[in-house]
Image (cartoon, rainbow, N blue to C red):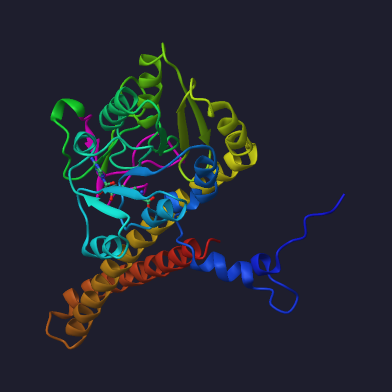
Amino acid sequence: MRAHSPDPQHIGTRDDPHVQARRARHRPLLLHSMALFREIFEIVFAHRDVETVVEVGVESGAVSGMYAELGASTVYCVEPSPTDGLRATLAGNEALQLVTTPSPRAFAELPVADLYVLDGDHNYATVRRELEWILAHAPEATVVCHDLLWPCSRRDLYYQPSTLPPEDRKPASTDGPTVWHDELTPAGFVGMGAFTSSTRAGGDRNGVLTAVEDVLREFGDDPWHLELVPAIFGMGVLVRCASSDCSSLMRDLRPYSGSRLLAAMEDNRIALYTRVLQLQHEAVAHARDADRMADTISAQCREIERLQAGRAHPRIRHERGGRLREETVHLAGALQRAVRGMWRRSSGR
Ligand SMILES: C[S@@+](CC[C@H](N)C(=O)[O-])C[C@H]1O[C@@H](n2cnc3c(N)ncnc32)[C@H](O)[C@@H]1O
């Protein structure tokens, strides 16, 4: 048996031991792009004929070109809020066509595709309508859905301003989820103006995975198979069971979808990331406290100087001066503790 030798370009050598650390340093702290699932898409493209792709939720366009590289001739990039950067990225590749009508409305304007990649508005109403349309109009397509795991599995998220009618939206907040407790918090996974989160998790008609389950049940007479890869917020691959290549595709995906190692790493990733968010939030709050205390201390120092300059009655000067000195010593101590706490938290001690 031959051992699989490690690739020095990947992990580094004795002479250049920092290769992996350098690569890690250049990755975003929060991995979220579908580009990271390239090896899963390679399996999909190896089993299925994919000429036309509809990519829903394009953001920076980081993934769009990948579908063309893997063999698609046309990729419809559905993004209702395209930035100038995205327009420039897509303009550089003639296989990529920008569509600004929001999904699922955009589907009816486009040719039926071989692959639909759903990563747009992560809520029950949108994903349910997207899937209902695809399963009814494109039964031979492969569907890839992102965000089937935390935080959107059982909790709606709404891109802002939301295009959904009020009856399709649950009460939502700018606070965000964390893995450290069940309620939303300003120290959680917040949208910073880009999206809000449903204040309640679970129940009916809430979350992306719930939408997928409901649609698959609805189409139970002509069943579809779901394989869920438990990494980077969860990626699902859906294919109609009656398709000739359904079982071979699912067999090749199973090492990923059945990986307890990937699932454990994803749990750990979201725990660490939401801990970082919490520490950042606390550091900002401590910095604000420290600023406030520093302002108070300097105002009190000025007051002490004024009193010492003898502009007040000696008895008032004595009493007020003593009190101010005590308060200032107290505040200086609190300021020191706040700064120490901030430093300890930000350095992870
Ligand atoms: C998570 S980002 C997509 C990331 C991208 N797929 C990637 O992997 O790099 C979600 C995007 O969906 C877009 N979006 C929100 N609602 C949408 C809708 N109804 N139809 C299409 N895109 C939508 C947002 O503007 C945002 O750019």
Which quarter of the figure has residue 50?
top left
Q: Let me know if residue 107 appears in the view.
A: yes
Reply above or below: 186 against 47.
Answer: below
User: Which residue is outermost to the bottom?
Assistant: 309
Q: Which residues are magenta?
A: 169-195
Reply above or below: 119 against 24.
Answer: above
Would you say residue 190 sits in the magenta stretch?
yes
Q: What secondary structure prevails in the magenta region?
A: loop
Q: Is residue 310 left or right of residue 158?
A: left
User: Which residue is outermost to the right?
Assistant: 1
In this orientation, which residue lies closer to the viewer: 256 or 341? Answer: 256
Residue at figure coordinates x 52%, y 48% from the top left: 269
Q: Let me know if residue 32 appears in the view.
A: no
Image position, residue 208 (x, y; %): 36, 31
Residue at figure coordinates x 53%, y 47% from the top left: 42
Quadrant in the picture for the C terminus: bottom right
In this orientation, which residue lies closer to the viewer: 161 or 305? Answer: 161
In this orientation, which residue lies closer to the viewer: 210 or 98? Answer: 98
Reply above or below: 75 against 47.
Answer: below
Image position, residue 95 (x, y; %): 32, 55
Would you say residue 181 sits in the magenta stretch?
yes
User: Which residue is outermost to the top?
Assistant: 221
- Count up the numbered dots: 0
Residue at figure coordinates x 60%, y 41% from the top left: 264
